[in-house]
Image (cartoon, rainbow, N blue to C red):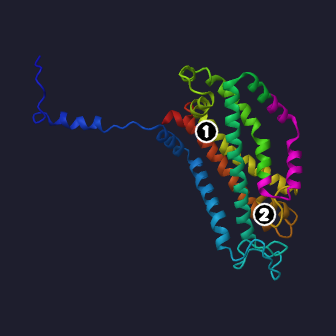
Amino acid sequence: MSTEMIDPTLHPQADAAAPVVAQRKRTSVFGLYYRRFMRNRPAVFGVFIFIALILFSIIGPMVAKYDHIYLDFLNLGTGPTAEHWFGTTPAGNDLFAQVSIGLQRSLMIAVTVSIGTTVISAIVGTAAAYFGGLLERSTLLIIHFLMVIPTFLILALVSNSAGGDWRIIALALIFIGWFFPARVIWTMALSLREREYVHAARYMGVRGMRIVLRHLLPNIGSLLVINFTLGVVAAVLTETGLSFIGFGVKIPDVSLGSLIGSGANTITSAPWVFYFPAAALTLLTVSMALVADGLRDALDPTSAAGGRA
């Protein structure tokens, strides 16, 4: 058999096939996650809803005709009109301005709490699993103790004594919200600390906290992303429950919970005072639940979305 090289001028089809192989590109990890997520249409729809709610909370106060604390004594408890797009409260507040400000405040509390709880639980859980010994036993003792005390009552007392300041409420929610995710993360990190790359880093003289931050945390990143997303929903619902019973954000500040609480008293005489903030809360929680479901499918290689990618 001849070993002569093929002349591309005599075999153009062979030359045309060569660039096809060269043009193939390897999909990055984030590109693969993006493709999996985009296949989940409800999750994509949830992202659009969440973005729309953020834009409403930012632009709403700018385009509102009245401030959320302004009292229109000529329109007390009136329905939606061209003057007041969402109507007014029995006290004369413009409901459009109050819902946009309330959504903004609830989002600020939820995102702050979710970031705080995710960061604290991730560092505490992985550090306890990696170092073990006294640190692990002490951390688990604190976590188990906090899991059995009535945290909701403590949260109500702290928020009530703070006068409804949303910053104090956010700190209190972080304090009572980090230990359960930390317990879950500790369980996952126990298996990771025995992996070969962790042992190799330890033998190379890498410090313990550097191993935790550079090797353990990135390998549970999918869990942290999902915890953050679900933490937004949990923080919104907790703050709403506190404000609904009078222990959350207080006048002149407003949140979705305080608006729903005041609207529940006038649901028969002025139902729009209840329905508009309730609709905003429902859209927020449903959108984040859809996004969390999509992220779980995208980051889980055993999911249906991952199998099709």
Farthest top residue?
1
Q: Position of residue 73 (x, y in %)?
A: 83, 81
Look at label 2 and name its amino acid. Val
Residue at numbered disc 1: 296
Answer whether labels 1 and 2 touch (C-beta < 8 Å): no
Residue occupying the point 80% across, 67% down: 273
The relative height of residue 104 versus residue 288 in the rendered view (above or below) is below
Question: Tag on residue 254?
Answer: 2
149 drawn magenta: yes
Q: Position of residue 223 (x, y in %)?
A: 63, 36
Residue occupying the point 63% across, 59% down: 54
Q: Position of residue 302 (x, y in %)?
A: 56, 30
Quadrant in which residue 174 is drawn: top right
Q: Position of residue 37 (x, y in %)?
A: 54, 43
Q: Secondary structure at mark 2?
A: loop
The relative height of residue 101 versus residue 40 in the rendered view (above or below) is below
Q: Nearer the viewer, mark 1 or mark 2?
A: 2
Left or right position of 119 against 172: left
Residue occupying the point 12% across, 26% down: 5
Provide the residue span drawn in magenta.
141-168
